[in-house]
Amino acid sequence: GENVEQHPSTLSVQEGDSAVIKCTYSDSASNYFPWYKQELGKRPQLIIDIRSNVGEKKDQRIAVTLNKTAKHFSLHITETQPEDSAVYFCAANTGYSTLTFGKGTMLLVSP
Amino acid sequence: SQTIHQWPATLVQPVGSPLSLECTVEGTSNPNLYWYRQAAGRGLQLLFYSVGIGQISSEVPQNLSASRPQDRQFILSSKKLLLSDSGFYLCAWRLQGDTEAFFGQGTRLTVV
């Protein structure tokens, strides 16, 4: 089955800095890669996603890049703010409509 | 619009007691349904998923079972809870294909 590795597990940045979270996947048939943000005690919510026919996607301060050859994708957050502090999950769509998630990255943005 | 309801929000149960968590989806038909468990505030582990009524796939052998008695209803059960069953349980739905998954509010289960 699919295996998704996510790094780092914890990331601390100063407000205004950029943050990058990286994921790798194992199944070359995976074709959809969402990113979720989960605030403490709440449900995960989609912040951005990318499909396998696209190499990069941007939405304001958030961008995602995908390298299908290398089987890795990354989340980039620019001009970080304290409210960006949360756990971020990457995921890959594989098999019969299942999503396999990475183990998460706790992002801490200090004012 | 589509909504997902999951209850209860919190639950404290003694070891050996049964469990039933319910999840319902409104505003869509024939969704794929999922149960995830999140331990220690990290890592989403897929427990079960269903692509149709009565169809259940188990990802991890364990002390839990799932059922889908109706198209938009997904139930997570246990006959006898273990301490290790404690965690944050999340129900989710999505349409087939490369689409977003929507999560319920979650149930925080503590087995004592």
Image (cartoon, rainbow, N blue to C red):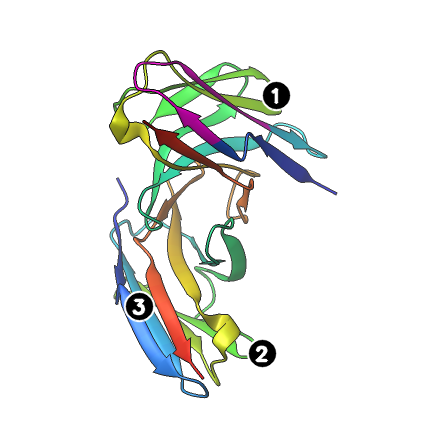
Dot 2: chain letter: A
Q: Would residue A56 appear left or right of B94 to someone viewing this image?
A: left
Dot 3: chain letter: A
Kind of element beneath mark 3: strand
Instruction: Check if mark 2 and mark 1 are on a common chain.
Output: no
- Residue at left offset 45%, top offset 38%: A97
- Residue carrying label 1: B71
Give me the C-alpha separation between circle 2 and circle 1. 37 Å
Kind of element beneath mark 1: loop
- Point out which mark residue A60 bears: 2
Give the camera-side residue of B2 and B13: B13
Q: Residues within 10 Å of mark 3 (few under 14, many from 20)?
A: some
Asked if the magenta segment contains residue A9, the reply would be no
Q: Would residue A95 appear left or right of A45 to someone viewing this image?
A: left
Q: Please give the range of residues in magenta.
A: B11-23
- Residue at left offset 58%, top offset 78%: A60
- Image coordinates of residue B11 in percent, x first then y, are 46, 29
The answer to whether one can see residue B60 in this image is: no
- Residue at left offset 61%, top offset 21%: B71
- Image coordinates of residue A96 in percent, x first then y, are 42, 35
In the displayed structure, would residue A21 be above or below residue B11? below
Q: Would residue A57 appear left or right of A9 to someone viewing this image?
A: right
- Image coordinates of residue A103 in percent, x first then y, are 30, 53
Q: Residues within 10 Å of mark 1 (few under 14, many from 20)?
A: some
- Residue carrying label 3: A22
Magenta part, dominant SS: strand
